[in-house]
Image: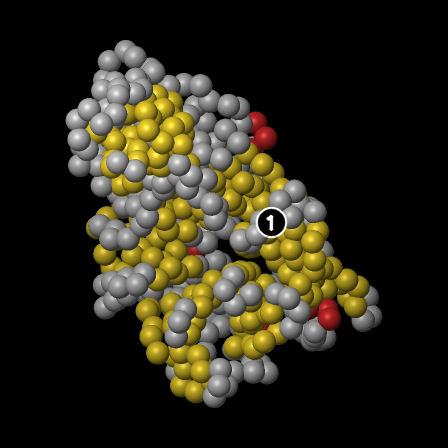
Amino acid sequence: MDPATARPASTRAKVRGPMLALFLLGCLACSPGDAGDYEVSVVRSEVVPTVFTVTWTSDEPGTGRVEFGPDEDYGRVTASESESGTEHRIVVAGVPAASVWHLRAVTETAGGELASADVEIESGAASPSLPTFSASGKRKHGSNLIAPVFSDHPFVLGLDGEGRYTWWWEGESDDVYTRARLSLDGTAIVFNRFDEDRSIDRGAIYRVSLDGTDAQEIPAELSHHDFVELPEGGYAYLKIDVREYGDGRVIVGDSVVEIDEAGALVSEVWNAWDEWTPPDDLSNGFYPQGEDWLHCNTIEYDAERGVYLVSVRNESMVMELDRATGEILWTLGGEGSSLALASGTAFEHQHAPLRDDSGMLVFDNRDGESRSYVRHYAIDEGAGTYAEDWTYAGPEGNWIALLGDAIPYDDGNMLIAWGTGGFISEIDSDGNQNWRADAEFGHIIGFLDSVESLGGPAE
């Protein structure tokens, strides 16, 4: 489904019985009688029928939230409203398709919490066009996994720990989606699009509300591979810059640009043509326009430090850019690295580097191996070195040519997307696989987001 075709939903959530509108009467206050009765209405989205909008009016002003789960113990909770009031509107997302779950509305007031009666909700079935996932084991972290998946056409999918669909969006047959993220305010899923024929510029960033009824297509000229949402609004993304060079050569370079919420250019942060000179020998396969020079493939933003982390695949290099000046602060890997490898194995043709307190995690797509790896490197900028200090070898026979991603958790567990291998796994700190979900044959997994709970105040 193209975002432009989305329409407002009006179908109401179902309880056991014929009613579509849910009215929950009889508020259960912390102290009986502290507040009068109030009504709660639950409406199921027609666009994404695993998402519900819950509205109610409380007798006392307070901040609202919704607790929900597979039974009356709930176990999940949406984000709370930031401002106190008596009118509340909360979106609940993350319910598995074709399931009966429970929820209750809660208002936190100055006098205590006021909770509605329990209500059963029934989510709709998943679209039959979605690729199937088979899951085994138990995922420990992240109730909701958001992943772009593509084959003959693309999807953005939400999956729970049992491999069940909790959210989905279907694209057109010529589209490629490689990155999907929960928006910074928690109200939408944002993902990128570029054309399978990369000589055609259909670059865009989509922002789709959790219930699917508000879908924005934001132009992102000549975008590819990856983008990141900026905390003050707008986005940064990887943009190709195609130029004639030398004796009749056409070379595809890269830049990092920033746009506002409407897609208007704000600034060019960095451009490879201002920094380097293309070598004589380049691969010539990925971009129809010309020779593929750098093939930048992921970008992350550290708001606290004001820096971008960019993966330069063809150079087997990662670089950190100062956002304000566009200056390269350091490069790691490849020829001419400003940080020297002190010990271990250098990565090659990598994807998805991610900084942490001690160094950097990276998905290693090195050639000539029977498998791919996830590696962590300790970085000592003062000494000008980096050193491999942890490695996870993927399954034998699973060399991943394209994509690949890893998300670490505080306890040492890690969620890994195996790109062209078509599966996602969670491992523990000892490298044991806790959980694995395999997509239908032929599907490729893009860059992930892991979210403990979806839903909260509606926009």
Q: Nearer the viewer, residue 163 or 247?
A: 163
Q: Nearer the viewer, residue 332 or 197?
A: 332
The quarter of the displayed image where residue 133 is located: top left
Pointer 1: what residue? Answer: 234
Residue 354 visible in the snapshot: yes
Q: Residue furthest right?
A: 247
Q: Position of residue 349 (x, y in %)?
A: 51, 69
Q: Position of residue 60 (x, y in %)?
A: 33, 29
Horizontal side of 175 relative to 105 (left or right) equals right
Question: Element under label 1?
Answer: loop
The quarter of the displayed image where residue 263 is located: top right
Q: Position of residue 368 (x, y in %)?
A: 45, 72
Horizontal side of 286 relative to 187 (left or right) equals right
> Image height check: is 86 above or below 383?
above
> Image height check: is 454 above or below 346?
above
Which residue is drawn at the image coordinates 19% and 24% (left, top)? 33
Total labels drawn: 1
Horizontal side of 234 relative to 159 (left or right) equals right
Dot 1 crowding, Cα within 10 Å, few <14, some 14–19, many 20+: some
Residue 163 visible in the snapshot: no
For the residue marked with disc 1, what is the amino acid?
Answer: Gly
> Image height check: is 341 above or below 399?
below
Which residue is drawn at the image coordinates 36% and 31% (left, top)? 61
Which residue is drawn at the image coordinates 33% and 64% (left, top)? 394
Which residue is drawn at the image coordinates 70% and 75% (left, top)? 276
Q: Position of residue 384 (x, y in %)?
A: 50, 86
